[in-house]
Amino acid sequence: MSTAAAQARSSAAAEDPVDALIKSIRIPPRPSLLADLQRELASPDPSPAVIGRIVASDVGMSGALLKLANSSIFGGRRKAKSIEQAILFLGINQVAALMTGLLARQAIPANCAALASFWEVSSRRAEAMVFLSRRLRIGETDVAHTFGLFCDTGVPLLMDRFADYESTYASASLEAERPFTALENERHNTSHTAIGTLLARNWGLSEDVAWSILHHHDYAVLDDADTTSTVRSLVALSLLAESAIRKYQGDAESLEWNKGGARAMAYLGLSDEETAELLDELHEAFHVDQ
């Protein structure tokens, strides 16, 4: 055997099994429309007209964007009748966040019975993140929306890869004390947070969004002064959103809130009464958009 062949075989044998596993998971490529949008946003002077043309190039996306723009969470009292008005009312960055979410829905498989409500919950979470970001005047609403929509995108990708991941996900959802990701890592050597982070980076989303996805079940990060305020804020707001969604779905409690809610309130400077009032407002907003 030649030296080169021996080195190649040695290298293959030494490959990290976790790296090999991650390579076996199908990460959808970044949609061309998203690449076009990000290219325009990265220009020195992004053009609303150009962004409008990108959106209008997909009829289904245009209609969905207008529907979202006119929801109570995003549109308020003004109703956009065209893509141009939606961009004017919402701003370029928020339109870009909404578009990114719509493209994710098209690209990421979520068609099995276990994922029947996946996008409904993801959209609800994204809307909750926008509401909370505005209400508490924390961070940028488009960043909050993007994180809220993408934080669990690793779930359908893992269901697509592992036949038994549905069982893992169901069991992890019932973990009262351990991190949600503990069982995922035990059974599959990866987690939905790790895969979601990989997708976010492949799609060119911001590092703050990617890191927040990675840590959104790691509530110790809320006490870590070395972690950026954006990441900590997104993780804290996601716990509030999770609690509100559970209430909206009729659940008696949120196990994730039980694990990290106290830390989230402390980080956000909220009292029990302020938190309860905020969650009631969010719950009411959910019903308005039914």
Image: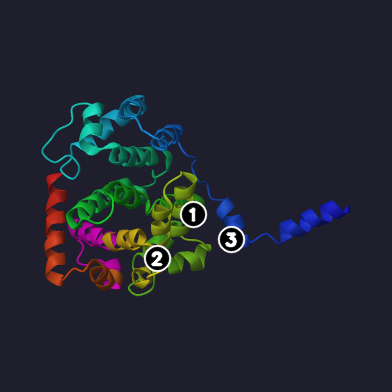
Q: Residue at x 71, y 62 (%)?
A: 14
Query: Considering the numbered disc 2 on the image, is that residue within a helix, a strand or a loop?
Result: loop
Closer to the eye: label 3 or 1: 3
Q: Provide the secondary structure element on which disc 1 rests.
A: loop
Residue 192's place in the image compared with 36, above or below, is: below
Magenta-colored segment: predominant secondary structure: helix
Question: Which of the labelled discs sits on residue 227, or is there none?
Answer: 2
Q: Earlier in the sequence, mark 3 or mark 2?
A: 3
Whole-percent x, y for residue 1 in the image: 89, 54
Q: Which residue is mark 1?
A: 163
Reading the image, the residue beneath label 3 is 18
Seen at 37% across and 65% down, the residue is 217
Please provide percent x and percent y for residue 84. 25, 27
Name the outermost residue toward the bottom. Answer: 177
- Residue 117 visible within the image: no
Q: In the current view of this chain or complex, which residue is farthest to the front?
A: 44
Q: Residues within 10 Å of mark 3 (few under 14, many from 20)?
A: few
Q: Amino acid at mark 2?
A: Thr
Point out the stretch of residues depicted in magenta.
238-259
- Mark 2 in CB contact with mark 1 (< 8 angstroms): no
Q: Is residue 216 above or below residue 117?
A: below
Above or below residue 35? Residue 146 is: below
| Badge 3 element | helix
- Residue 242 colored magenta? yes
